[in-house]
Amino acid sequence: MKPESEWFTPAAFSEKDRAQQSPSLDIGSIPEAAEYVACFGKARNLNRLSHLKNLKCLWISGINERQFESLCHVQSIDTLIVYDLRVPNMTGIERLKSLRCLIINGNTKTLTLDPVGELQNLEHCKIENFSKVKRLDPLGRLLKLRSLSVQGSIWTAMKISTLAPLQALQDLRAFSLLNVRVQDGSLAPLKQLRKLRSIEIANFFCLREFAELAGSHPLAVGDSLLPRISVGWPCKQCGSDMVMLARGKAPFLCPKCQKNEVDEHDREFNRIKSETAAQLERSA
Ligand SMILES: [Zn+2]
């Protein structure tokens, strides 16, 4: 089982990601044969990117609308990693037909992921800090997706209506949902994704949702499939590791000082989990 981080980091990128330390400010100085480029959106000669015939992987930071237009012509790339995209309308990105991996870290201007939904060859997709986006429907059209990560910003949760569109992603192996609040409160759409093996979901759902998800995916790994996780600091009274229960709300509890509440939670979680697993077996 690959760790989650590998699902989201294509090999071509991880080998060369040290180049991020010094993104280019002039594409004119980049060798003709370059396969990987890290640059700023404000780099000079940005249009030259589309003439680098071997370019496969592009890491780029700080993009306005004019620079985005240039980016959408770099048709050779299979991996695009963008930081700080400041573009209300992402139309044009669908021209990048070879894209298999797309990571966009921050676009607080756009209202919709529609253009991303046109990238039919995408296998890995991570979007983070799209604060105005309320619907994931376009992502549900990316039927080749093997890994998907949707995240709010560090400070603010993303608010979306439902995970239902993701039910169509039957090839999905890894799914991550961090700092995202889902209005219908349901993880049920993920239960039918039989190939999921890595699941990471922030503690924003109720006990039953987490327990049913765990029961539906006996082969998957992830903290969100456990009844509780250690939070990494000791109880002030007894020194035991404090825990957070999978039930969508604080507070943190001490498994010794608040033994009854923690045990009761574990029992209920495991009861629902087993019940769901048994149902699944009967229907198989
Ligand atoms: Zn204690």
Image (spheres, rainbow, N blue to C red):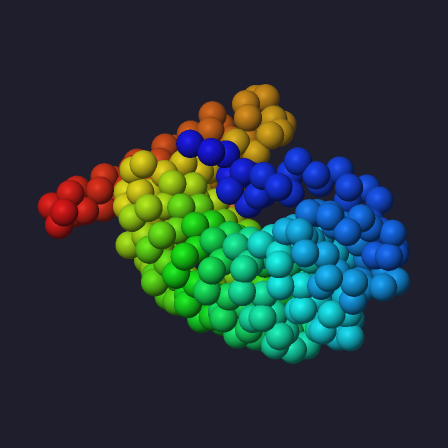
Residue depicted at x 13% and y 50%? 283
Q: Is residue 107 left or right of residue 221?
A: right
**Which of the pair 5/215 is nearer the observer?**
5
Q: Establish if 107 lies above or below 205.
A: below
Q: Which quarter of the figure has residue 6?
A: top right
Q: Position of residue 230 (x, y in %)?
A: 52, 31
Residue extending farthest top: 239
Q: Is residue 17 left or right of residue 205?
A: right
**Which of the pair 132/123 is nearer the observer?**
123
Q: Is residue 230 left or right of residue 23?
A: left
Residue depicted at x 44% and y 38%? 222
Q: Establish if 127 lies above or below 15.
A: below
Q: Is residue 40 visible?
A: yes
The N terminus is located in which quarter? top left
**Which of the pair 85/262 is nearer the observer?**
85
Q: Position of residue 243 (x, y in %)?
A: 51, 34
Q: Is residue 175 visible?
A: no
